[in-house]
Image (cartoon, rainbow, N blue to C red):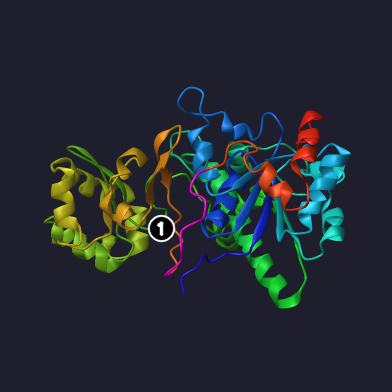
Amino acid sequence: MAGRVLDGVRILDLTRVVAGPFATAAFADLGADVIKVERPGTGDDYRYGPSPKGQTSLSFQNTNRGKRSITLDLRSDEGRELFLQLVERADVVVENFRSGYLARIGLASEVIQARNPRCVVASLSGFGHTGPWAGRGSYDIVAQATGGLMAITGAPDGPPTRGGGALGDFVGGLYLAFGIAAALLERERTGRARVLDLSNQDAIFAVTDSAATIHEGIGARMERVGNLHPFTSPYGCYEAKDGWIVVGTASNKLFRAMCAAIGRPELAEHPDFRSHRGRAARREETNGFLAEWMRERTCDEALAVLGPEGADVPCGRVASPEELVDDPQLVARGMVERHPHPELGEIVFHGNPLRYADAEPRERVHAPALGEHNAEVFGEIGVDAGELARLAERGVV
């Protein structure tokens, strides 16, 4: 029988802005009951971003879809006690405050797990809970810089470059989701609920393409090469008459196929171009002859020659996210979600790339209004309407 992959999993989500909400949205997509705990009155700062005038941010809509929202002042004694009552029914508490904040307000992981020993506690912060930089503030660009990614991104003659979008935050969010899933799996095997301490600097350093390993082993530095590849060529982004095409030839076979397709089969037999190392050493030359060929053609013409109907070399047109809402492959895969919204008309979400056979979609389609589920969630722990009104009057919820 079809169902949701994470039916029955309840997550108390204290995260805000990008990295944490992105992680917990993935859980909501798979059926978890994600309860977003927000500040009374203002909520998550990400509610106030790009949107039609007077409406909740569209970015917030995308990274908080499928959740329930409650408001709660965790700095108050009553707010903390209500939160701990919710903890008793939760599988996970996840937060991305600056390291040490929850402990300072009386909600350290020990306090949470004393109330519910089976509750996984997961934290994502800029630099983690340990080390000399613990507690420092961070944003996406700081993580990319201090984690090593910016130093290897960009053109050789240009400055270090931040990856497009909030790449550092999304990488941190992916590691956060993976860490929580692993902790839940272990808890089901052993009964033990772990505490996860994730640093966004650590997450970025982990994806810097073995650069430190290579340097420590053979002394080679990972230099900025723009869209090119440090170890093979041609591999890059090439301008056609009406756009840009990327091509990757990361094997000798593909290089030979590409040379034949562009009418230069003799290049594949050139002694300097027979190996990855030789082509990489002369990447200016090898990328140059492909760039020259590409400039004389439209994107469609180039793809017809190099793509699956031609030489079958990995290649593709550079597309913007805005163009991709009509991309036939992404649409067929369910990655472009269109939903009617009571205030926003139609809203488009970036879909969840995890595809499980026969799994049902998430129960709640949209992101919640601030405090939309106060009565529902607090009612589950015995708070009646009268008490909820009194709590709201005192600013607790």
Q: In the drawing, does residue 127 fall left or right of residue 229?
A: right
Residue at figure coordinates x 69%, y 53% from the top left: 198
Is the residue marked by circle 1 packed among few (<14), some (14-19), or many (20+) residues within 10 Å?
A: some
Count of labels shown? 1
Instruction: Find residue 197 and report its image quarter.
Output: bottom right
Q: Residue at x 33, y 62 (%)?
A: 250
From which residue to which does the magenta span run? 357-366
Badge 1 is on which residue? 231
Residue shown at the point (58%, 41%) measured from the top left: 18
Main secondary structure type of the part rendered in magenta: loop
Mark 1 element type? loop
Residue closer to the observer: 21 or 53 = 53
Q: Relative to residue 292, is residue 105 drawn left or right?
A: right
Q: Is residue 130 visible?
A: no
- Using the image, determine if residue 365 lies above or below residue 277: above
Image quadrant in which the C terminus is located = top right
Residue furthest to the bottom = 189
